[in-house]
Image (cartoon, rainbow, N blue to C red):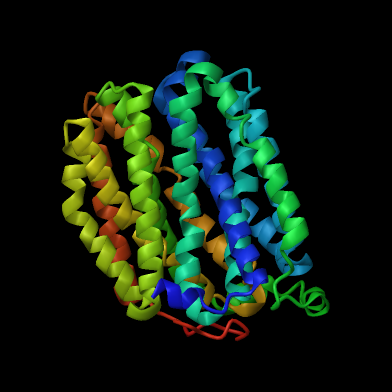
C-alpha cells in the first residue's frame, strides 16, 4: 500500500514532503526540550514545577496567533517564503530561551516562541497536500505528522546524551544550526505550491475572514476536534518525562530510553495509520485507533518497571500518533481552498489554545494526589480518546476531495 503511494513521485514532491517533515521535526524538537527540564528550571529560578509548566501553557496558547499571522502571509505571499521565515523565527526564539535570567523572562520567551511555532504545521500541511497526488495523501499525512514524534525522539536523545554536559540552557542552543541548513535546503530545492496563484491571492487577500465566516460550521467543528486531539497528544506526552523522573525516580538515560521507544511507536503509528486511512477512510481509522488506546491507558500509566513502562508508552503512542497521522490530510481536505494556508493551522492551533490548560491541570491534579502522576495522565488520556472518537463518528469527511475546490463537503 505504501509502495504504491510512492510510485510516480517527482523530485519536487519528494523535496517538498522532506522539507515539510523536517520543518515540523525541528519545531517539535524545540518544543519538547521544555518538557525534559521542568525540574531543572524550577530549581534554577526557585519555583515549583507547576509554575514552570505555565510556560508550556503560554507556548500553546500563543500558537493560534502564529497560525493566523503566518497562515495569512502564506495565503498572500506563498507557502515557501513564509515557511522559511517561520523556521528562522522559531529557531532564533528557541535559542534565546537559553539566556532567560528569571521565570518571567522565561515566560515571555516561551510565549514568543509559541507564536513562531504556531505557523509551521499549517504551512507545511498545505504545501505538501497541494503538491502531491491525491492517492498519496494518506501516506504523506503520516509522514508529515511523524515529524512531531521525531522531534520528541531527537530531544530525548539530546537529553539522554548531552544534558549532563551542556545543561538545560545548552539544550536550547543545539537546534539553530540544523534550522539554518533546513532554510537553505528549502531555498534551493523546494518550489512554491502549484495551487498558489500570486495574482489571485493578492486580489483576494481580504477574503479570509469572509471565507471562515461562510464555513463557520466546519471551522467550529474542526476547532473542537483539534481540542480533543491536543489533549490526547499533550496529555500523553508533555508530563511523561516528569512522571518518569519524579514519581519513578529514573535517571536521564533511563528516561531517554523509555521515551525513545515511545516515539518509535509514535512514528510507526503515524506512518501506518495515516497511510491506512487512504483506503479505510479518515473517520473510521481515527475511531479505530482512539478506541484501541482505551485498554492501553492503565498499562501505560500504572506499570512499575522501566521495561513495562516503555512497552506501555510504545503502544500508547502508536495509538495517539496513529490518530494524528490522519489529521494533515483530513483537515486540508475539509479546508476551503482559498484559505488553506490559514484554515487548517488556525483551527489546529485554536484547539491548542483551549487545550493549553492541560499541563498545569495535570500537574496540579498530580500534586493534589501527593505526587501521583498516574491518575492525572489516565484521566486526560481517557477523556480525550472518547471525545475524538465521538466527534469523528458524528463529523464530516472529504476523502480525496479536489484541492482546487472552493469549499469542503460540510454545509
Residue at point 37% right, 52% down? 266
Seen from the viewer's position, the closer of residues 81 and 214 is: 81
- Quarter of image, res 129: bottom right
The picture places residue 219, in percent across and down from the top left corner, at 51, 70
- Number of residue marks: 0
Q: Residue at x 61, y 31 (%)?
A: 174
Where does residue 364 sit, x and y in percent of width and height? 33, 31
From the viewer's perspective, is residue 83 above or below residue 191? Answer: above
Q: Is residue 292 left or right of residue 69?
A: left
Q: Nearer the viewer, residue 345 or 30?
A: 30
Seen from the viewer's position, the closer of residues 70 and 263 is 263
Residue 388 in picture, x, y percent from top left: 32, 63
Which residue sits at x=44%, y=81%? Answer: 399
Q: Is residue 51 visible?
A: no
Please give the name of the residue rendered at 30% of the width and 29% of the height, measured from the top-left corner: 244
Q: Looking at the rendering, in which quadrant would you find the N terminus?
A: bottom left
Amino acid at each position: 500500500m505504501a509502495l504504491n503511494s510512492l510510485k510516480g513521485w517527482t523530485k519536487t514532491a519528494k523535496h517538498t514532503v522532506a522539507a515539510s517533515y523536517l520543518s515540523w521535526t525541528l519545531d517539535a524538537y524545540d518544543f519538547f526540550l521544555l518538557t525534559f527540564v521542568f525540574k531543572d528550571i524550577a530549581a534554577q529560578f526557585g519555583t515549583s514545577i507547576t509554575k514552570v509548566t505555565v510556560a508550556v501553557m503560554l507556548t500553546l496558547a500563543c500558537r493560534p496567533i502564529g497560525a493566523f499571522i503566518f497562515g495569512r502571509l502564506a495565503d498572500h505571499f506563498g507557502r515557501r517564503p513564509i515557511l522559511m521565515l517561520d523556521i528562522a523565527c522559531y529557531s532564533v526564539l528557541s535559542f534565546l530561551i537559553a539566556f532567560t535570567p528569571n521565570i518571567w523572562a522565561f515566560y515571555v520567551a516561551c510565549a514568543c516562541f509559541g507564536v513562531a511555532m504556531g505557523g509551521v504545521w499549517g504551512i507545511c500541511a498545505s504545501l505538501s497536500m497541494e503538491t502531491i497526488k491525491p492517492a498519496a495523501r494518506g501516506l504523506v499525512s503520516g509522514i508529515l505528522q511523524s515529524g512531531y514524534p521525531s522531534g520528541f525522539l531527537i530531544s530525548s536523545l539530546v537529553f539522554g546524551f548531552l544534558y549532563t554536559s551542556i545543561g538545560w540552557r545548552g539544550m536550547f542552543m543545539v537546534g539553530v544550526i540544523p534550522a539554518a541548513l533546513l532554510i537553505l535546503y528549502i531555498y534551493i530545492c523546494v518550489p512554491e505550491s502549484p495551487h498558489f496563484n500570486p495574482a489571485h491571492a493578492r486580489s483576494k487577500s481580504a477574503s479570509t475572514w469572509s471565507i471562515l465566516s461562510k464555513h463557520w460550521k466546519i471551522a467550529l467543528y474542526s476547532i473542537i476536534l483539534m481540542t480533543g486531539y491536543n489533549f490526547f497528544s499533550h496529555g500523553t506526552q508533555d508530563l511523561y518525562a516528569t512522571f518518569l523522573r519524579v514519581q519513578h525516580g529514573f535517571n536521564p538515560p533511563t528516561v531517554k530510553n523509555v521515551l525513545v521507544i515511545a516515539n518509535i511507536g509514535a512514528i510507526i503509528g503515524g506512518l501506518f495509520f495515516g497511510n491506512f486511512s487512504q483506503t479505510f477512510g479518515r473517520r473510521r481509522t481515527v475511531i479505530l485507533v482512539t478506541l484501541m488506546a482505551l485498554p492501553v491507558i492503565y498499562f501505560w500509566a500504572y506499570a512499575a518497571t522501566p521495561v513495562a513502562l516503555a512497552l506501555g508508552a510504545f503502544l500508547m503512542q502508536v495509538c495517539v500518533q496513529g490518530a494524528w497521522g490522519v489529521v494533515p490530510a483530513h483537515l486540508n481536505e475539509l479546508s476551503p481552498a482559498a484559505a488553506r494556508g490559514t484554515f487548517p493551522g488556525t483551527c489546529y492551533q485554536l484547539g491548542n489554545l483551549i487545550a493549553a490548560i492541560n499541563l498545569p491541570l495535570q500537574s496540579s491534579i498530580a500534586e493534589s494526589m501527593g505526587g501521583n502522576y498516574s491518575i492525572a495522565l489516565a484521566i486526560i488520556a481517557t477523556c480525550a480518546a472518547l471525545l475524538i472518537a465521538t466527534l469523528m463518528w458524528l463529523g464530516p469527511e472529504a476523502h480525496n476531495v479536489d484541492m482546487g475546490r472552493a469549499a469542503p463537503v460540510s454545509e
